Image (spheres, rainbow, N blue to C red):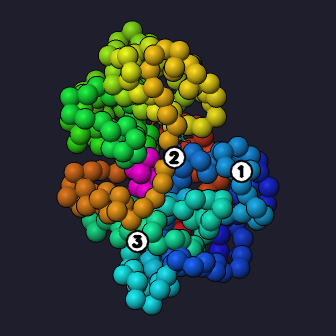
Amino acid sequence: MRAMVIDATGGPEVLVERSIPMVEPAIGEAIVRVAAAGVNPTDAKTRAGRGTSRLIREFPAVLGVDFCGTIVQPAFDAHPFQPGDSVYGMVQVPRLSGSYAEYLTVPVIAIARAPRTLPAAHSAAVPCAALTAWGCINSVGAVAAGQRVLIHAAAGGVGHFAVQFARMAGAHIVATASERNSAWLKELGADEVIDYRTTRFEEETGDIDVVVDLIGNVHDDTGTRSLTVLRPGGLLLSVPTGSWPNYRADAAAAGVRASDIRALSDTATLTAIAELIDDGELRVHVDREFPLAEAAEAHRLLEEGHTRGKLVLTV
Ligand SMILES: NC(=O)c1ccc[n+]([C@@H]2O[C@H](COP(=O)([O-])OP(=O)(O)OC[C@H]3O[C@@H](n4cnc5c(N)ncnc54)[C@H](OP(=O)(O)O)[C@@H]3O)[C@@H](O)[C@H]2O)c1
């Protein structure tokens, strides 16, 4: 089967097209013919030797955590997801089969029927980012009506879903983004948009119940500065890994709570997300689609850090 693989970690140029052996499913896994794969920052971090690269067991390795495609072999003869069914979901790469490929194997508990109303390339953009946003707003963050939520990098993949889930929860939403994304974020549900390029957010807002921090201390101590806008006992969700090792101690010293969070895929949550999409409640924005062979180009664009919504590879 055709795949984009890496033979070593490094820059985007290490992504090369290759013919590799067909995937073999483990117990409880289905084989999916991939129609499209999402491009996520974790792919680029792992490719670069950061992120989850320490978990790569052998090269060549196939990256790509989320996808939309068609079942070609069910997990069990009579499993509800049968050949020809359109499914979407997320796998824990690099331990499991990657989506930058013609086929992948995936535990059936990590997939669901794809939204009926979206083309495959748009469905593929949903799982990782939307599941992360769902965790931030609906499960770990447990955002309630009337609460004040600050969402950093609101215009990105995770952020644009987080804004919409927070709107559905009835929260007051403060978002950070550059000016060009302000009107669009207000359409999605943001009440206030602070331009991080011109304004210190901590001078504009406060009394926040939950911060969804999608930046961390990679840029201008965004994480540390966020502690000052939380109400006492408020919660900071530190989504990027690694940029702020002391977030727990710093939060405790500031009298607020902090937690890390990881995207986890399950059929029930993906089904709920697909229903919101099909009901017209939730939108996915695809900034740009690339053919699979241009994965390196997609990584270059992603690493510039200004994607609106998502980038996708079509297979
Ligand atoms: N823990 C997990 O399981 C998990 C899951 C998913 C993602 N993540 C992590 O979460 C982070 C966000 O992921 P993502 O997919 O949403 O990223 P993304 O789509 O690449 O984010 C791009 C967005 O970031 C905005 N941005 C850049 N610098 C900013 C700043 N200083 N302040 C505010 N906004 C800024 C840009 O807006 P402008 O163009 O307006 O500047 C752009 O829209 C990444 O670090 C990713 O690795 C973790």
Residue position marked by numbered label 2 in the rendering: 262
Between 26 and 97, the one nearer to me in the picture: 26
Q: Is the C-beta of the residue carrying label 2 under 8 Å from the nearest atom of ligand 1? A: yes
Q: x, y (%) of residue 273? A: 31, 57
Q: Image point 45% across, 16% down: which residue?
A: 255
Q: Indicate left or right for 184 with 133 as reference.
A: left
The stretch drawn in magenta includes residue 24: no
Is residue 173 in view from this perspective? yes
Q: Indicate left or right for 263 with 154 as reference.
A: right
Q: Secondary structure at mark 3?
A: strand
N-terminal of the pair, mark 2 or mark 1, is: 1
Quarter of the image where the N terminus is located: bottom right
The amino acid type, in three-letter code, at marker 2 is Arg
What's the magenta region?
A: 125-133
The amino acid type, in three-letter code, at marker 1 is Ser
Q: Dot 2: few (<14), some (14–19), or many (≥20) neighbours within 10 Å?
A: some
Front position among marks 2 and 3? 2
Q: x, y (%) of residue 33? A: 51, 77
Q: Secondary structure at mark 1?
A: helix
N-terminal of the pair, mark 2 or mark 3, is: 3
Q: CA distance from mark 1 to mark 3?
A: 27 Å
Q: Secondary structure at mark 2?
A: loop
Answer above or below: position of 108 versus 248.
below
* Labelled disc at residue 53: 1
